[in-house]
C-alpha cells in the first residue's frame, strides 16, 4: 500500500469508506470544471472507488490514486495520483475540495 506523510497531510490509497468525501468534491461543478470527468453522480463516485481499489491489485501498477487527508480534521480533502505509468514516464494530477 502506498502511503506518504507530511506534517499536515497524509496521502494513502483510496478505500470504500472514502465515498462521502470523494463524492463531496467529485460532484461539485466548480471542482470538476477543468477535469475530463464530472461532476459525478453518486454512482460514478462509487465506480471510481471500485476502479481505484481494483487498480491497487494490479502488478505492475499502471495507475496510483491517493486520497489526500488533512490530518487536523482527519478528512479526505482531495486526491492525487500517477496515471499511465511506464518505465520512463507518467502523468500526475490532483484535485482538491473547494472547502
Image (cartoon, grey):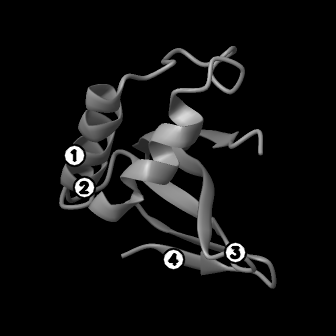
- Mark found first going from the N terminus, 3 or 1: 1
Quarter location, residue 10 = bottom right
Instruction: Please report the residue visible at 18 percent of the width from the left and 51 percent of the height from the top.
Output: 54
| Classed neighbour count for the residue bearing mark 4: other residues with Cα under 10 Å, few (<14), some (14–19), many (≥20) | few
- Image check: 23 left or right of 35? left
In the image, residue 85 lies at what x, y percent?
A: 44, 44
Local secondary structure at mark 3:
loop
Where residue 50 appears, as percent x and y from the top left, is 22, 46
How far apart are the two marked residues, 2 and 4, measured between alpha carbons?
A: 14 Å
Mark in front: 1 vs 4: 1
Select label 4 or label 3 by which is in front. 3
Instruction: Mark 4 and mark 3 in contact? Answer it, CB < 8 Å.
Output: no
Label 4, on which residue? 3
- Work out which quarter of the rendered image holds the C terminus and state it: top right
The residue beneath circle 1 is 50
Q: Does residue 64 appear anywhere in the picture?
A: no
State the residue at coordinates (79%, 78%).
8
Q: Which residue is mark 2?
A: 53
Front one among 74 and 85: 74
Label 1: few (<14), some (14–19) or many (≥20) C-alpha neighbours in 10 Å: some
Q: In the rendered image of this protein, does residue 20 appear above or below residue 72?
A: above
Spatial CA distance of label 1 from label 4 is 19 Å
Which is nearer the N-term, disc 1 or disc 4? 4
In the picture, residue 61 is in which quadrant? Answer: bottom left
Amino acid at each position: 500500500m502506498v502511503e506518504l506523510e507530511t506534517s499536515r497531510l497524509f496521502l494513502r490509497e483510496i478505500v470504500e469508506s472514502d465515498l462521502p468525501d470523494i463524492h463531496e468534491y467529485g460532484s461539485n461543478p466548480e471542482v470538476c470544471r477543468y477535469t475530463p470527468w464530472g461532476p459525478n453522480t453518486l454512482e460514478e463516485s462509487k465506480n471510481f472507488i471500485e476502479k481505484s481499489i481494483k487498480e491497487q491489485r494490479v502488478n505492475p501498477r499502471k495507475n496510483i490514486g491517493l486520497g489526500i487527508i488533512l490530518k487536523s480534521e482527519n478528512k479526505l480533502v482531495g486526491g492525487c495520483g500517477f496515471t499511465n505509468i511506464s518505465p520512463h514516464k507518467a502523468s500526475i494530477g490532483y484535485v482538491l475540495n473547494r472547502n
